[in-house]
Image (tube, rainbow, N blue to C red):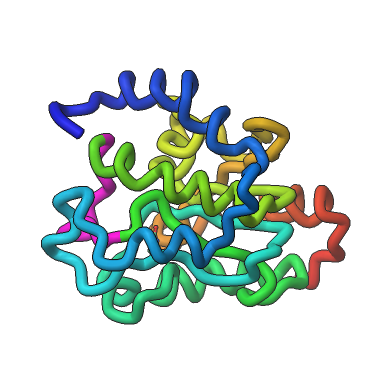
Amino acid sequence: MSGTVSRRMLAAWLREVGVDYVLRPSPRGETLDDIREELTDCRRCPLCAGRTTVVFGVGNPRARLMFVGEGPGSEEDRRGEPFVGAAGKRLDQWIARIGLRREDVYIANIVKCRPPGNRAPTPDEAKVCLPYLLRQIRAIRPEIVCTLGVSALNFLLGVEEKITRERGKWRERDGVPVLPTYHPAFILRNAAREAEVFGDFDLLASRLRLSPAK
Ligand code: URA
């Protein structure tokens, strides 16, 4: 890949070939392990220089519900698993609230290697890594994808939206409903907004016909 990709170019690329193309059922029946194997020692973008581990994703390969975050933080980079730090503990609480366990769902990120200083992934980094996430979605075929935070919303859907305006609104790509909500790290800093997340999780529960534990 050469040159710098603007958010607008990435959005156009995703709309034209990315999400619509990749979310079609895999004719080859690709598995998560097939995809993981391709990423062993991945050097496709500069994030490889600072990472300890490729954080592929974790959870039930047949999950009905999949979460997509932004990118691994330091704890995730060290342990090789997404959302295991403070934000992850909050996500686990939200999952428990709708009567599920972490092992029931699948959790992944827009990029699989830790961006330095916990910054958001750049459009270039997202463009390189996103096809693998989209293939994971196609392999799992969840009933719902819930995006966590603004980066996951915009990079997954190829849009440029504000999370405050778009959270709690259903989107769809190739028949896969997508519900954006806030990132748990944002809620750790803005506790007053957690009620909105609870509302979003109620939407997830009702669409999956789960009984929220509360
Ligand atoms: N934040 C994310 O977006 N993903 C993680 O895996 C951890 C923190």
Residue 83 screen position, x and y as percent: 44, 69
Q: Is residue 115 magenta?
A: yes
| Magenta-drawn segment | 113-123
Q: Is residue 150 magenta?
A: no
Residue 118 screen position, x and y as percent: 23, 59
Q: Is residue 98 left or right of residue 160?
A: right
Quadrant assignment for ligand 1: bottom left
Q: Is residue 103 left or right of residue 161?
A: right
User: Does residue 195 show up?
Assistant: no
Tally of numbered tags:
0
Q: Nearer the viewer, residue 165 or 42?
A: 42
- The residue drawn where x is 43% and y is 34% is 154
Q: Is residue 45 left or right of residue 84?
A: left
- The residue drawn where x is 31% and y is 20% is 9
Instruction: Give the image quarter of residue 66.
Output: bottom right
- The residue drawn where x is 49% and y is 75% is 89
Q: Is residue 179 above or below residue 78?
A: above
Residue 24 screen position, x and y as percent: 64, 36
Is the N terminus in the top left, top right, bottom left or bottom right quadrant? top left
Is the C terminus in the top left, top right, bottom left or bottom right quadrant? bottom right
Residue 74 screen position, x and y as percent: 25, 72
